[in-house]
Amino acid sequence: MTIPRGAAFAAGMAVMLIASVPAQAQHSPWGPSWGSPGWSNPAGSRLPDRRYRDQREGRVEVSRFVVAGPAAEALGHGPVTVESESGDGPWFAETQRAAYEAAIVDALVGAGYDTQHPSDVQAQVARLRISRHVLVPAEEKKSPVSGSAAVSVGTHGSAYGLAVNVDMTKPRAALVSTRLDARIADKATGKVLWEGYATIATREGDDDWSESRIAGKLASALFDNFPQGEEIEPLGTSLD
């Protein structure tokens, strides 16, 4: 009897598949295969997660002090002018300080001051100092691809395995602290009536934290419930 050529081919393939099942069920003479549960991955340790958020980011800390006695009654009304200077750390140019001056002017207006009509009569002056320093340095740039290899040698031969880690996260920018000091003094005598400072931590170059937003955040915190603050004896006459 003549068997059709197509049927003969199908029968041959069936025999090959049946014969291959026991072979696949056998364990490798070199131990567990690469990727199996028993393989000890040489690069199995996880890469450090650089996406975590530092708890200090965006957090504002503030302290305020007000002079004790009747002198404090002069706060919150009348004409006031605003001056600024660069404090410790990198130099803050006048153009950078402008954002802080504008934020303080808005806060002073909200507190009841007149910033549009300066006068020497019962005039006060708000002196600002802006400082910045690094809390956590920027991360170093690293290769996005890393890996390791392992070789297993047995009586029947050897096996070679390679693990590759790909980390496409960008190095984190430096975490910096910005501090805004403010003092309100009697313009004629130089006597300080109120002072405070506020700090905030942000990532350097973060688009979400422009200089204007940082300034607004600090000024708002400083003048919250103005002129409330810890009462102390008459303050000095400068920011030193």
Image: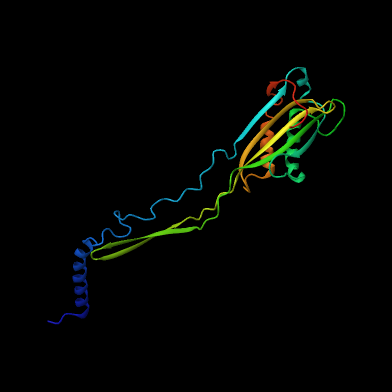
Q: Residue at x 47, y 59 (%)?
A: 145
Tell me if residue 113 comes above or below residue 69 in the rendering.
below
In the rendered structure, the answer to whether residue 19 lies left or right of residue 145 reads left
In the picture, the quarter occupied by the C terminus is: top right
Quarter of the image where one finds residue 100: top right
x then y, percent, for residue 137 = 58, 46
Q: Is residue 115 left or right of residue 144?
A: right
Residue 90's quadrant in the figure? Answer: top right
Question: Residue lying farthest right?
Answer: 120
Q: Nearest the camera: 65 or 115? A: 65
Q: Position of residue 50 (x, y in %)?
A: 50, 48
In the image, residue 178 sits, relative to residue 42, either above or below, namely above
The outermost residue toward the top is 69
Q: Is residue 9 visible?
A: yes
Q: Residue at x 48, y 48 (%)?
A: 49
Can you see residue 76?
Answer: no
Where in the figure is residue 221, as x and y percent of width and height? 66, 32
